[in-house]
Image: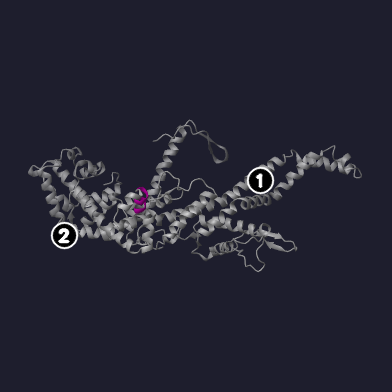
């Protein structure tokens, strides 16, 4: 049972009804006050949790205080209640009779197992959440739960039965070729790549390795892993009906067990573990490739902007008092309109000052052109070797017609990957709207040897990749068989609507939106109050009065907690 309770929750779930008050031991018959309070606590605890508490420490103090207040008793009385006495056993019997609850029978155990296997275990819940669901189901059936250890044995037995059934189902969907390939992944009879290696590594261990430092070599290594997983020919919808959390559990088991341990499992379990690992690993590698693509595109722009800014700052120094200098030049020119520049202008402004003035005034006009030139140079000399490999390994899609132009433009890029031509064909229907910026003619247009304006391939590729980055980050464009960047319509489990309450309990979130908002507002108010009260006492903070108040200073110490 949770330890923190709001007043509204206490009133709703722990208020004693008249019929329940009438059930309490009567003080006139010499029943002690602690028996009344202990009886009431047992009753309300069972109604909420579906079981009796094992000891007084299981009951939060807020609940004890609330029930004691209703009975006009002291909380000290609950500490004197004997939790392992004949009186408590009699109280439990009276509560069972009042609530219509019976002991668990053999048929109840079988029914609970069946319900767990069919409804709950496929959700991949943690063991504690599984136990909470079992208590709730027994409460609905009006069955008293068994002892904690006995219930745990029952749950683990159901989990084993579910695992056997699930693994048999998955293994049955695998072809004979796929099963043989999975067995080959676990083979450690010979070194994987280097015959001179001192240790033997299975192909599965190779698939577990991290990509390492970003570079062309590590990129090709990840793509090679992806190809090896594709060679298994796992059905694309193998785990689509399984909850992602359940697949993650099998994936973690396969990633932590060495190949020799995996080989010892029964065939169905072995195939399911390795298939779950490879199925999930494929999505992880896909996500890594998409993240790498986004970083490459971002790095192109950021690096180019920084280099251009450094070059511009180094190429000229700012000319001070430009207005005064221009006034002097104009005055001298009007006084001697027939004079030579060397005799009239140079005495006012030397050639170096004039050149600095020209550089400063022209810098703003060519900034974007310089940036684009740097982007083009970086892309051509380094990143263009990596991007085609990534695009070949990924399949892009979109569920919105508005974003289809980017997908269509990527298809054009893939079609021209093997071409060495500088320009696109004149009759090529390039996708412009929804992909390129408004100033696209200046960015991708280039005059050829015949004087005609043609579309430069490199410039068009850069613009398409920049548009792709924004769409990927917003999930407007997604990648097939990826995880984090996969189809957003598949983010929720397929049975989310049927088991909404269970999933919300697992997330520790309320079902009602209003309750979630109130909880969030309460948290924000608490944190802001702490900030408001602690900041003035923090010696490392200064609150200035300019521009509606600035907070400045070094936060040398944490804000005081109140």
From what the image shows, is residue 81 above or below residue 163?
A: above
Residue 136: give x, y in percent of width and height. Answer: 24, 54
Which sits in the foreground, 536 or 111? Answer: 111
Which sits in the foreground, 7 or 219? Answer: 219
Residue topped by disc 1: 308
Extreme residue in the front direction: 196
Extreme residue in the right direction: 338
Residue 352: give x, y in percent of width and height. Answer: 79, 39
Q: Specify whether 460 is left or right of 477.
A: right
Q: Specify whether 30 is left or right of 357.
A: left
Q: CA distance from mark 2 to mark 1?
A: 78 Å
Residue 438: give x, y in percent of width and height. Answer: 64, 59
Which sits in the foreground, 369 or 451? Answer: 451
Q: Is residue 239 visible?
A: no
Residue topped by disc 2: 107
Q: Which mark is residue 472?
A: none
From what the image shows, is residue 229 above or below residue 212?
A: below
Q: Specify whether 518 is left or right of 164.
A: right
Q: Specify whether 429 is left or right of 490.
A: right
Which range of residues does the magenta coloring cover? 250-256
Extreme residue in the left direction: 29
Mark 1: few, some, or many residues within 10 Å (few <14, many ≥20)?
some
Mark 2: few, some, or many residues within 10 Å (few <14, many ≥20)?
few
In magenta segment, residue 259: no
Residue 394: give x, y in percent of width and height. Answer: 50, 59
Q: Quadrant of the C terminus?
A: top left
Q: Secondary structure at mark 1?
A: helix
Specify the quadrant of the image occupied by residue 199: top left
Specify the quadrant of the image occupied by residue 273: bottom left
């Amino acid at each position: 049972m949770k330890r923190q309770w709001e007043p509204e929750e206490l009133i709703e779930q722990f208020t004693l009804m008249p019929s329940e008050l009438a059930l309490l031991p009567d003080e006139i018959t010499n029943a002690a006050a602690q028996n009344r309070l202990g009886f009431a606590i047992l009753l309300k605890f069972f109604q909420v949790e579906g079981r009796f508490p094992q000891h007084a420490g299981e009951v939060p103090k807020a609940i004890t205080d609330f029930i004691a207040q209703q009975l006009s008793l002291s909380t000290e009385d609950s500490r004197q209640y004997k939790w392992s006495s004949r009186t408590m056993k009699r109280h439990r019997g009276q509560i069972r009779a009042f609530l219509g609850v019976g002991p668990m029978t053999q048929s109840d155990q079988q029914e609970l197992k069946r319900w767990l296997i069919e409804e709950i275990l496929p959700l991949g819940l943690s063991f504690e959440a599984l136990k909470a669901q079992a208590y709730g189901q027994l409460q609905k059936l009006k069955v008293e739960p068994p002892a904690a250890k006995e219930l745990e044995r029952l749950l683990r037995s159901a989990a084993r039965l579910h695992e056997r059934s699930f693994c048999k189902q998955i293994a049955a969907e695998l072809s004979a070729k796929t099963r043989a390939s999975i067995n080959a992944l676990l083979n450690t009879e010979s070194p994987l790549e280097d015959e001179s290696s001192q240790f033997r590594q299975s192909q599965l261990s190779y698939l577990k390795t991290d990509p390492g430092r970003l570079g062309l070599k590590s990129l090709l290594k990840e793509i090679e892993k992806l190809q090896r997983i594709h060679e298994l020919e796992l059905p694309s919808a193998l785990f689509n009906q399984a909850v992602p959390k359940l697949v993650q559990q099998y994936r973690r088991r396969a990633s932590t067990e060495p190949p020799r341990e995996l080989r010892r499992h029964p065939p169905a379990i072995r195939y399911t573990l390795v298939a779950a690992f490879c199925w999930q690993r494929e999505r992880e590698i896909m996500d890594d490739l998409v993240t790498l693509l986004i970083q490459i595109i971002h790095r192109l722009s950021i690096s180019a902007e920084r280099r251009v800014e450094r070059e511009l700052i180094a190429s000229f120094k700012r000319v001070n008092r430009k207005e005064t200098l221009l006034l002097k030049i104009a005055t001298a020119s009007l006084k001697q309109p027939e004079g030579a520049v060397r005799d009239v202008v140079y005495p006012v402004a030397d050639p170096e000052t004039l050149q600095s003035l020209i550089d400063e005034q022209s810098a703003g006009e060519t900034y974007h052109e310089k940036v684009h030139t740097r982007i083009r140079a970086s892309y051509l000399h380094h990143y263009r070797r990596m991007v085609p490999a990534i695009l070949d390994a990924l399949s892009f899609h979109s569920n919105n017609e508005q974003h289809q132009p980017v997908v269509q433009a990527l298809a054009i890029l893939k079609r021209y990957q093997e071409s060495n031509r500088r320009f696109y064909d004149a009759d090529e229907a390039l996708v412009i709207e929804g992909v390129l910026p408004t100033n696209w003619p200046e960015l991708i247009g280039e005059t050829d040897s015949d004087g005609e304006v043609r579309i430069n391939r490199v410039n068009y590729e850069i613009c398409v990749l920049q548009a792709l980055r924004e769409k990927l980050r917003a999930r407007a464009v997604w990648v097939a068989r990826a995880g984090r960047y996969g189809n957003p319509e598949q983010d929720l489990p397929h049975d989310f609507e049927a088991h909404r309450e269970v999933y919300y309990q697992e997330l520790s979130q309320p079902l009602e939106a209003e309750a979630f908002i109130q909880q969030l507002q309460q948290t924000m108010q608490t944190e802001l109050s702490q900030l408001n009260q602690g900041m003035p006492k923090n010696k490392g903070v200064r609150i200035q009065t300019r521009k509606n108040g600035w907070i400045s200073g070094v936060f040398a110490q944490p804000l005081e907690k109140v």
